[in-house]
Amino acid sequence: MACSRPRSILLALVLLVALPVHSQEKSTLLHNPPDQAEAGQALVVDGVLTGTQRILRVVLRYRGSGEPYTETPMELQYGDLYRGVIPGTHLAAPGVEYYVEGFTPGGERVPLFKSATRPARVLVAGAEPPARVPPLSTRTPPEPEAPPRAPPASRAPEPAKSARKPEPTRSEPARKPEPARKSEADDAMAALNAELPADTEPAAAPPAPERPSRPLPPEPAPVESARSQMEEDLALYTAEDTLALATRHEESVKKVPAIAASFGREQIRSLGARTVADVLDVVPGLSISRDVQGFHRTAVRGLRNDAEVLFLLNGHRLNNFFDGKALMNLPVDNLERIEVIRGPGSSLYGAGAFLGVVNLVTQREEGLFSSASVGGVPKKVEQGLAPAADLHLAGALGLDRLKLFGDGDVWYQEGGSTAVEKDALDADTLAQKLREPLEPAGYTHDDRFLLNLGLGAEYALSSRNRLTASVRVMSEDRAALLGLFDTMGPGSRLKWMMLLGDITYERQVNEQTRVRARLSADRQSTDRLFQIGPDNFRTGPDDRTQLFSEGMLEQTLVTVSSLGASVDADLSLFEGNRLSFGAVGELQTLDDYSYLTNYTSDSRRRDELAPPTGLVDIQDIAEGAVSRRLALGAFVQDQWTVVEPLTLTLGLRADVTQLPLVDKDSLAITGTHLVTSLNPRAGLVFSATDSLVLKLLYGRAFRPPTLQELLEQIPNTYYNQGRFVGNPGLQPAVVDTIELGADLIQTAGEARVRLRGNAFYEGFSHPIAAVDTSGNIVPVRNRELGVRVYGVEGEARLEASKRATAWVNASLFRAEDLELPANHLYLTDTPQARFNAGISMPIGDVINFDLVVRAGAERRNNTRSVLELVRRYRIPAYNLITAQVRTEPIADHFELALLVQNVFDFDLRDDVPRPDRIPNLLPREGLSAFLTLRAHL
């Protein structure tokens, strides 16, 4: 009997998928009402219409203090965004109430946001309420000092209402004592409701029943949470349905002019994800790997380069100016959502938005949210558990016009340790008896300490003006997973410190125009100390100069900073149109660069770390001009709903980037010059039916070479092989992308099925790549004939109920280097096929079970050079399973979750630069388990 229930659940899920569902999904309006508005100034109400139910017209119904409801249309701006305006004459203390309805083709009026009985309530401060409408004949007249105001002509009292039985006057003496309210705001809103006349409903509405003649005490006004039940349901059912990254405005994912995905808090939790990398690894077309230094690397559609995926945190760039890397693998507990664009994003975000864009949005909801996890990884070298613990706290507090918010993460892990049988110094360490013959060359090290703290404030200067400021500090201290290149480095330490600051001013000029200005600044310092030879390693017989008691060491210290400013505006030229335009500027500087070693060019020991002989200081090249980069850009984008089912998006961004000027004969850098790039964008989104959306997209992106790719020249020695050689003559890379997409949603009752699919072609001009041709020094250059990538991606999701979901996605693509012969042109160092699936189901009323499967095809070495052809490796296909048991909210405030990652302890491996020296490749994370407690107060 116990076994039959899960089988029945699975059978029901299969039947739901197979059913020819044709019913429509109820439409709703996604909208967050403000906490407060300014007296006498118009209140703009924006909302995104979701669902497949056909809505011909959207109306906003509102009322001020002592007024009946008034109705005004909400106009379509672009895509699914509707806008309505409550005139300033109706905004007076203590507040205003409103809700939104829509009209179906049959004339039926349906609720879209809130209702007449539970409207959205916005406090209004700064002015007394206007004279109130005289009550109907069933109410006691107002006090003499408040002369009655004639009712609006459009809302004349109906005779039927005057025939009702008399009602008692709702004056203070006639009331029973009410329970204590939580704040003065609640008292003000209760006063607003207490003296309102009866709602004037549409003519089709049935007459209200007669009221009893005896007085009835009013029910206590319910204390509204920050998000209504409707919004909570939407957050669960359509967590990936809204996105602001692709157009700078929140919009439905299925209609946004990009191939995009968005993961909300509930979906992130159901994935069993602990870090950003865990989430990105289930996105179609993306795969996450690690290198020997321990950095997480994001591959998009078969290509992998740190500088070609733009990472943003609340819109602030995280990528390092020097090498393009980003401190991106943050915990997810304090994130509101993760937004991902696959494909070019330079038309909005400029340089670096090349293969894709990822935006991490932190939580700013009012209240206090916290979580704590403990667990670890079983040790493979000895008995016991390598512990891990993390603590997360986020919250926001509203104080009249001021809102304070903040979040913090503390993360510690000892990390797993797996044997690495051989490395480049395998014969040397055995000959020097630094290890026994049967012992491995070393073990991986994955300990990490992370601190992430952010604080901010938002101040409403008025109902039309808002100022937001935020600061953040992030610090990471960890070991290298293996080492620098091809030798074990147990004494390596990698430190990263980031300071970020933003100030944003936003003004709603009128109903059609909104302006934003932003200042941003950041400073990143990296300290990467690598041990390239073990403790007590010898380079010769001389104990004084050739014995390294602390190992051979090298250290790279880099500090970069950036200062940016942007101004942009949104203008609605006419109904169904939104024009966005703006200008940006950013100055990036290399403030410090040091490369130090404790050995000389002939491999003799130094007493302290010092620059090697012959090192060129990057900051001195061309009198320091190349250590600064100025980037200026201007963009314009227009979204126009030509007819109701068809939305056209056209955009263009022009960028000017400062790059080194190179003498063609001597190849010497003589200064800098400005390089111009144009990045167009076009998108056609067609709603073929209420449930089917088709997309045709084109975009171009560019990315300039990093400073490291341009300038870094490290003196070559026997023990520090595998260096990239900077190339000052590198040209910016350009990609042109064409995409076809389809999105289908079908519903049956509470169940919903979503199908998405897309095909793409990407053509890269002058892609930047490092190809090993010598076995030691690796040159970086442009691939002159380019690279092309083509493939398909698809996903399906079944939502049987709020707690029962199943999903699957797959991607298949080919990446080809066109400089190579036909039998060698495939780039296969990342999985060319990916498959992910998951299921969430309830076990009783309290427990939920989540299961996620990640699978990838086998990977092989590229064959772009003779050495790559000789140094073969093969990484088998893999299957990783994550299982989780979590509770529903306990006492409305607490949740527990037990998570197991890599359930069957699959031996996952990643590629290494020299597979001939590390033949067993790079071991990855194994089995791990964590217990998490979450609290919401």
Image (tube, rainbow, N blue to C red):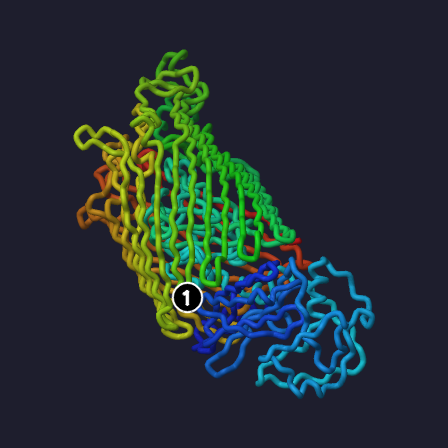
Residue 778 at x, y percent in the picture: 27, 34
Is residue 397 found left or right of 516 in the rendered image? right
Residue 421 in percent (x, y) is at 40, 34
Q: 721 or 144: which is nearer to us?
A: 144
Query: The N terminus is located in which quarter?
Result: bottom right
Residue 357 in view in this figure: yes
Q: Which residue is drawn at 63% across and 52% down?
A: 398
Q: In this view, does 228 lie to the left or right of 55?
A: right
Q: Dot 1: what SS?
A: loop
Q: Closer to the camera, 709 or 777?
A: 709
Task: Mark 1: give few (<14), some (14-19) or many (20+) Cα within 10 Å.
Answer: many
Asked whether residue 271 appears in the rendered view, the answer is no
Residue at 70% x, 74% y is: 148
Task: Identify whether 919 is placed above or below 596.
Answer: below
Q: Residue at x 31, y 38 (%)?
A: 658
Foreground residue, 79 or 281? 79
The percent position of residue 160, horizontal first and vertical second, equals 67, 88
Q: Which of 373 and 487 is in front in this view?
A: 373
Q: Quadrant of residue 604?
A: top left
Residue matched to label 1: 79
Instruction: Tell me which corner region of the image, top left, top right, bottom left or bottom right, holds residue 847.
Output: bottom right
- Above or below, 825 against 27 in this view is above
- Count of all numbered marks drawn on residues in the image: 1
Q: In this view, does 557 lie above or below 253?
A: above
Can you give x and y, in whole percent of width and height, for residue 332 in the image? 52, 49
Side of 432 relative to 121 (left or right) = left
Name the amino acid type tagged 1.
Gly
